[in-house]
Amino acid sequence: MRPSARQPDQLRPLRFIPGFTSQAEGSVLAEFGETRVLCTASVEERVPPFLRGKGQGWITAEYGMLPRSTGERMQREAARGKQSGRTLEIQRLIGRSLRAAADLKQLGERSITLDCDVIQADGGTRTAAISGAWIALQIAIQGLVAHGKLQQSPLKRQIAAVSVGVYAGTPVLDLDYAEDSSADTDMNVVMTDDGGLIEIQGTAEAAPFSRSEMIAMLDLATIGIEQIIAAQRAVLTD
Amino acid sequence: MRPSARQPDQLRPLRFIPGFTSQAEGSVLAEFGETRVLCTASVEERVPPFLRGKGQGWITAEYGMLPRSTGERMQREAARGKQSGRTLEIQRLIGRSLRAAADLKQLGERSITLDCDVIQADGGTRTAAISGAWIALQIAIQGLVAHGKLQQSPLKRQIAAVSVGVYAGTPVLDLDYAEDSSADTDMNVVMTDDGGLIEIQGTAEAAPFSRSEMIAMLDLATIGIEQIIAAQRAVLTD
Amino acid sequence: MRPSARQPDQLRPLRFIPGFTSQAEGSVLAEFGETRVLCTASVEERVPPFLRGKGQGWITAEYGMLPRSTGERMQREAARGKQSGRTLEIQRLIGRSLRAAADLKQLGERSITLDCDVIQADGGTRTAAISGAWIALQIAIQGLVAHGKLQQSPLKRQIAAVSVGVYAGTPVLDLDYAEDSSADTDMNVVMTDDGGLIEIQGTAEAAPFSRSEMIAMLDLATIGIEQIIAAQRAVLTD
Amino acid sequence: MRPSARQPDQLRPLRFIPGFTSQAEGSVLAEFGETRVLCTASVEERVPPFLRGKGQGWITAEYGMLPRSTGERMQREAARGKQSGRTLEIQRLIGRSLRAAADLKQLGERSITLDCDVIQADGGTRTAAISGAWIALQIAIQGLVAHGKLQQSPLKRQIAAVSVGVYAGTPVLDLDYAEDSSADTDMNVVMTDDGGLIEIQGTAEAAPFSRSEMIAMLDLATIGIEQIIAAQRAVLTD
Amino acid sequence: MRPSARQPDQLRPLRFIPGFTSQAEGSVLAEFGETRVLCTASVEERVPPFLRGKGQGWITAEYGMLPRSTGERMQREAARGKQSGRTLEIQRLIGRSLRAAADLKQLGERSITLDCDVIQADGGTRTAAISGAWIALQIAIQGLVAHGKLQQSPLKRQIAAVSVGVYAGTPVLDLDYAEDSSADTDMNVVMTDDGGLIEIQGTAEAAPFSRSEMIAMLDLATIGIEQIIAAQRAVLTD
Amino acid sequence: MRPSARQPDQLRPLRFIPGFTSQAEGSVLAEFGETRVLCTASVEERVPPFLRGKGQGWITAEYGMLPRSTGERMQREAARGKQSGRTLEIQRLIGRSLRAAADLKQLGERSITLDCDVIQADGGTRTAAISGAWIALQIAIQGLVAHGKLQQSPLKRQIAAVSVGVYAGTPVLDLDYAEDSSADTDMNVVMTDDGGLIEIQGTAEAAPFSRSEMIAMLDLATIGIEQIIAAQRAVLTD
């Protein structure tokens, strides 16, 4: 029995609110249950120094949590003077996943930065961020195409992400904080709309996990990601 | 003629959304037109080192802007590794104003931190933050009273803040970004519900301002703050 | 009765010592009673990156306190690895005030940095810094004119600054540390020689202040600034 | 055909040199081909602040690369003033893996820090670090038992790690730098001696990977880890 | 011929101005020609963490240069966010030299910090700082004795310092900036009043120096330090 | 009697292992007894900004200690976020010494960085680093000559370094940690192969040292450096 009374293969209520803020080239609020992440895409007509003159673009991400997005207030990273290892790890994951969805040559010498800021946290913020950021990126790119800055979209794949885990001995989909904090195993999966794997990161929390548990978690992730992919599409075709 | 076609003494549409997030002891989204600031109050049962054992509490504030709350993306302060002088100046102003509203002895040995995070910026973020933070603080304190942790509220004054300025030669109330960025003079005023002054910070941007312009701006601020005070009360009595 | 036995409208003994150090293009020791601030102006034939190629110059300020300029030793900011919010706030105020005194286009593509270092602190260091820095700036600019680097002075206004406050219920001029640390209200005012306002920053310390107290403080500031303006001129015409 | 002419399931020459340095409680040089990582275990009779008084110990890791361990000199992280995201991610992985091998309650209120410093890098430094650090940890714990500080070993599992990937379309074991830098997919696997999974981190570099590729990589990892486990044991029983 | 027309064994005009600032327990302005260093001694009734409970005191030093103490403005170390290697090296030297002059056990569990801030630099700032700091330390300790906090002085030696070098092939005493910046060899010497060596730091700038040049420099340093020692005493007996 | 039972003028067993790592242009492990320092030379075809276009090269050094190179684990400087004063002082000394050995004009517009990383510390790490770094530099320069990038070697002098001190009243050569930590005086000497002095840094630890003790230490250093010079040559002619 899950704390939320969900079925093992049941996602939390899922909502993407495009245009949540108005200034960014792409903006989406991604809600997975009580988890809410604001994802914005910012286009800049320049690339980082290491890519100058190489005829390609860049996609990167930054991640942050508002200090009181959590049950106890966390120290503000800007005040502390540095981003935590967890933050850096997450924003590297988001950026890598989105770059895997695009053809950076076709993007041209411009950068798109995905800012993923957690307004409220209840588990699964990094996978919500990836799923929302893909929409924000897609909106920003549609704008570039609409304004004639790009002939065609450099987005070659649709991607989404979800967390899975083993909770009280049972593989479950889309862990909330209550599950996440006492799970035996925790795994984040990023996949494409045709079932290809982009990232898989599994961690034994309480005990090693078996190959069959891993397969079961992958099966759940596939179920979840299909629904997230559909929800992403629904928002974009509105 | 103001860019927004408002009258010189007209506030932007004003809205306070209490309970915008669920984990903090107090949470309000303060909207002044397109400016949106999330204000949360976090209660902690300890005080900073310099106050330990002194029998009093502490109220402080932190301020941040999401990187794409603005027309052009700003560098994330957490990534840059430090808060800007502007950020520090604003959070010092917010904290000082709220401490002026409270009796820290009556608060007891606990701290309340007001996090003011700008989701979207269109001028006047610091005054929106102060006006919203006062509500979040009030909600948090009501909770402490309701839970029996405080016998009576240490909040001795209601405060609110607004910006005023001289735009195209005319004193105006509640500047938006279009006005703020080309104003002759810019002034932020924090007042109590009975008209007392808590903070006044006026800056000549293009030309020195006269004493009579200052009086005219103060008059406008008084008009605006009365309405904000009323809106704060309306939210709290709901 | 003021701790120093001064009249409410009486400045402390005021002295500006030009040429206190010999290497800077402009150098003044500003003394307001026991407060002593060394102000130097450094001219550099370049502008910061954000102004390159825009055909204008830049004036900026930095502020520091020697660790033992105060009654108790303060931590050295260079050792601590960052400037405090108070320091940043003060140096922003000094720089903004001096820029308001100059025509940056006429300055050409060069920068002048005003370093204001507090040798001894007894209240009013920021206003002493502004008043002294204006002299150092003027000396540096006279040098540029004398050396043929500028045809005419880009300094379009003379400015000076003073602190005022409400102490023991009475508005007073030029607070020393004993007054400042127990004042009800504290206000810093920057004005031009013809009475225009450049900056006004008033803060309620113990209780809100009224509009009439604010006017009384402004009157005192006007009296004090006239005398400081005269002292600045006396130094420059020697 | 692999650049090194190895079979797809063939490890590089593997060597663990215990006692490589003499001052640490445990010290091992782990060599996977040209990759050489010095792993030391340091025992301290205290725990970090967040664990004080909780009756348990702590195991953590730090990772670094000597600036010229690589083909081109990298900037020294100490000189740059911060550890990179990659470094933080790797040392979090090492620490988490080793904690999964131990019973922290049985360790008592003491800390063991595993320092993993890369002397020479040719791919697979993080998995070499984990495999070597487990030995250093085991040596340090044997010392604690031998000196009567621990009644029995809190090490409940033997763990080792290896990288696998898809190179030129073929799943291969233990990638060197030449393979790693042009692999389609890269996966790091940490396992126990009885085949349980501790960590799995797979990343699509050039193209998404399929579930069957993932299974093939897992099979290779299992083969490799068995050999590394045997080599660890051989060193410890000498 | 020296740029200053001094004899090889001639010091610059030397002046120590005690009581240059009023708040510190000891304060001296040390002038060696155009070099001016403000040295203050601050007494605190606590010791750093590594000495707590060890029944001894601590003497340490910090060094800084005002940004425009030099011919070209230097970046402010507080703004840059760290102290340079040169600054750290100098303050370590000052602190070490002064600790060598005192019996830290007799000082009791208190700290004395010597802040040496360069108001104007013309070569030899570190040796001027040591010579001045010894006076400030002595004044502070006399105060502790006078106030009954110490029974007897823990200062067991009088120390002073001077720079020597080889300029244009000739050993010279007390280099100014013009000499220092083109000297073949540069050496700083700290000695006691009875001729004992505390520190000697010699550096070949243009060419290696011989043993006989080193002896000649030591002879000059001895001559100079005797005069500085006498000047220190003159100030203290006034 | 020395703790190691060595004669006062006896070096520890000395060994230089060239090619200890394979990627750097020069690589040597320098062993002085139990002290082991890895020195690598990295050639880069650019110079730091302050030398651009000046037609000369640059030689610099960085120094680090592995956290557990010592008896007690030290905090990792990269994790702490800055290099200590001691580290900066040492790397400045190494760089200065090696620059004194070379003609930077003849090096052309390229940089050579010497990384000196202490694998194991038993006293004398900085002098071992200098002695080893000279070999690594020489190997790197031989490579540049061999590859036709340089017509002739810009290395104009052979240098080596050793520590000397006064231990238990007797001048001794090449102090190990046991001696160093309780020596009366400690002195580091850098010399050329023809007996010229490059650097001399002597510090009184427990008591001032006399001129005759200094001469005796210099004599010992000369004896030691001759042997180190010979060992350097032996390695290079192999």
Image (spheres, coloured by chain):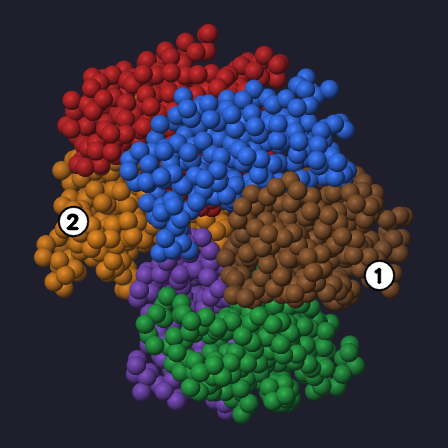
Chain colours: A red, B blue, C brown, D orange, E green, F purple
Going by the picture, which residue comes out furthest to the left?
A: D151
| Residue in the image at 19% along x and 28% along y | A167
Q: Position of residue A202 (x, y in %)?
A: 27, 31
Classify E204 as above or below D104: below
| B55 vs B17, nearest the viewer | B55
Number of numbered discs visible in the structure rendering:
2
Q: CA gap, disc 2 to disc 1?
A: 77 Å
Name the element at disc 1. helix
Query: On the image, which quarter does residue A116 sit in?
Result: top left
Q: Using the image, name the chain to which the residue with label 1 belongs.
A: C
Query: On the image, which quarter does residue C229 sit in?
Result: bottom right
Mark 2 and mark 1, same subunit?
no
Q: Using the image, name the chain to which the residue with label 2 belongs.
A: D
Name the element at disc 2. helix
| Residue in the image at 74% along x and 39% along y | B211
Classify A214 as above or below E55: above
| A26 vs E43, nearest the viewer | E43
- Residue type at numbered disc 2: Lys
Split into 4 quadrants, where in the image is the N terminus of chain F? bottom left
- Residue type at numbered disc 1: Ala
Q: Which residue is mark 2?
A: D105
Label 1: few (<14), some or many (≥20) within 10 Å? few
Q: Position of residue A226 (x, y in %)?
A: 32, 14
Q: Which mark is residue B46?
A: none
| Residue in the image at 20% along x and 28% along y | A166
Q: Which mark is residue C234?
A: 1
